[in-house]
C-alpha cells in the first residue's frame, strides 16, 4: 500500500505542477494580450486626436513683395523684403532669402503681400 500511495501522490504533485505551468502560460498570454490592447488603444487614440500633418500653419521665412512689380520687371531691394509669415500653404520653391532673387525678372505681375517663388521668375541665361 505504501508504494501505491506514493504513486498517487506523485500523480497529484505532477498534476499540480502541470496546472501551475498551464496557469503561468495562461497568465502570460492574458497579460501580453492586455498590454497589446492597451498599447494599440493609446496609439489609435493619439492618432485620432493629434493634428494632421501639414494641417497647422507654418511660420516660415519668405521673400515678400513690398511694392507692386510689373511683369518682366527686375526685382530690386526696394521691391522685396524678407519676413516671417504664418501660412498654411507655401510653394516648395519659395525663396527664403532676398539675395537669391535680386536682379532676376518676373514672369508676371507681382502684387504687394505675395511671396516670391522660383516659378514666378524668368529663367536665367
Image (cartoon, rainbow, N blue to C red):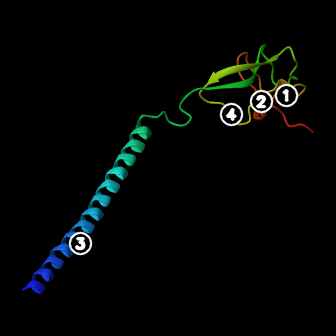
**Other residues around mark 1 within 10 Å, as few (<14) / some (14–19) / many (≥20):** many
Q: Position of residue 32 (x, y in %)?
A: 35, 56
Which residue is labeled 1 in the image? 101
Q: Contact, CB < 8 Å: mark 3 with mark 2?
A: no
Q: Quadrant of residue 58?
A: top right
How far apart, in angstroms, are the residues tagged by discs 3 and 2? Answer: 72 Å
Alpha-carbon span between mark 3 and mark 1:
79 Å
User: Is the residue 42 above or below the residue 51 in the image?
Assistant: below
Cα–Cα gap, marks 4 and 1: 15 Å
Residue at image x 61%, y 30%? Answer: 89
What residue did someone put label 3 on?
Answer: 18
Q: From the viewer's perspective, is the residue at label 3 or at label 2 nearer? A: 3
* Residue at x 42%, y 44% (from the top left corner): 43
Circle 3 Cα neighbour tier, 10 Å, few/some/many (<14 / 14–19 / ≥20): few
Q: Are marks 2 and 4 in contact (CB under 8 Å)?
A: no
Q: From the image, tell me which residue sits under label 2.
A: 95
Of callouts 4 and 1, which one flags the residue occurring earlier in the amino acid sequence?
A: 4
**Secondary element type, mark 3:** helix
- Tell me whether the residue at label 3 lies in contact with that at label 1, contact meaning CB atoms closer than 8 angstroms: no
Name the secondary structure under disc 4: loop
**Image quadrant of residue 124?**
top right
Task: Give the residue furthest to the right.
Answer: 125
> At which x and y percent is residue 115?
72, 24
Mark 3 and mark 4: Cα distance apart in space:
68 Å
> In the visual, does 87 lie left or right of 79?
left
Question: Which residue is under mark 4?
Answer: 91
Callout 4 crowding tier (Cα within 10 Å): few <14, some 14–19, many ≥20? few
Q: Which mark is residue 80?
A: none
Q: Position of residue 8 (x, y in %)?
A: 12, 80
Image quarter of residue 41 = top left
Which residue: 74% across, 36% down?
93
Amino acid at each position: 500500500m505504501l508504494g501505491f500511495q506514493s504513486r498517487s501522490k506523485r500523480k497529484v504533485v505532477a498534476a499540480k505542477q502541470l496546472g501551475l505551468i498551464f496557469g503561468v502560460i495562461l497568465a502570460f498570454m492574458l497579460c501580453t494580450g492586455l498590454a497589446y490592447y492597451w498599447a494599440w488603444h493609446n496609439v489609435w487614440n493619439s492618432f485620432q486626436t493629434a493634428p494632421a500633418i501639414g494641417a497647422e500653419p507654418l511660420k516660415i521665412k519668405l521673400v515678400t513683395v513690398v511694392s507692386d512689380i510689373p511683369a518682366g520687371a527686375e526685382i530690386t531691394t526696394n521691391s522685396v523684403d524678407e519676413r516671417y509669415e504664418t501660412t498654411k500653404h507655401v510653394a516648395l520653391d519659395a525663396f527664403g532669402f532676398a539675395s537669391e532673387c535680386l536682379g532676376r525678372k518676373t514672369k508676371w505681375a507681382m502684387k504687394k503681400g505675395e511671396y516670391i517663388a522660383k516659378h514666378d521668375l524668368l529663367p536665367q541665361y
